[in-house]
Amino acid sequence: QLEKKHEEEQLRSHDLERQCQELRLKTARAAQEAENSKIVSREELQRAEATLKQALAQEGKLQHLQDEINTLGQVIKLKDTLLDDRNKSIEELGRAVKREQEDKTLIVESHSHALEQMKSTMDSLNDELAL
């Protein structure tokens, strides 16, 4: 009967050793998975950091481009203002040339009228002298 107990204890011992071996394997797998997970997490963290750095660099470039766009907008506004001023100056010059032309026309008409009066007076004087 002791032998039977001894055999049962040996079977139980082998069963417990097998269970322990299975638990050791499961523990080793879990530890390996945890390590792999850490590695993956570390790699993911490194990728996330690299992505963040790229995003920050892109944000810096975007800010620079926005500054350039704002500057170009100001240049365009200034150019438009200068064009408006130039067009106003051209219009004013056109009005001045028109006024000058009108003044010259009036002077020519006035001189022409004066010459006609002088001719008429000369003709009258010639007529009187002829008598």
Image (spheres, helix red, strand yellow):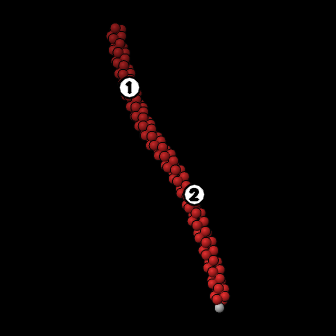
Q: Where is residue 114 drawn, in percent x and y? A: 34, 18
Determine whether the residue tagged by mark 1 lies in a helix, strand or loop: helix
Identify whether 21 is placed above or below 56: below
The quarter of the rendered structure image containing the N terminus is bottom right
Name the residue rendered at 51%, 47% in the picture. 57
Q: Position of residue 100 (x, y in %)?
A: 38, 25
Identify whether 49 is placed above or below 97. below
Front residue of 73/24: it is 24
The crowd level at tag 2 (other Cα within 10 Å; few <14, some 14-19, many 20+) is few
**Residue 95: x percent and y percent?**
39, 31
The residue that disc 1 covers is 100
Query: 131 or 68, which lies in front?
Result: 68
Please rate how many residues cluster around mark 1, counting C-alpha atoms within 10 Å: few if below 14, some from 14 to 19, many from 20.
few
- The residue sitting at 61% across, 68% down in the picture is 28
Give the residue pinned by disc 2.
43
72 up-or-down from 44: above or below: above
- Residue 35 location, quadrant: bottom right
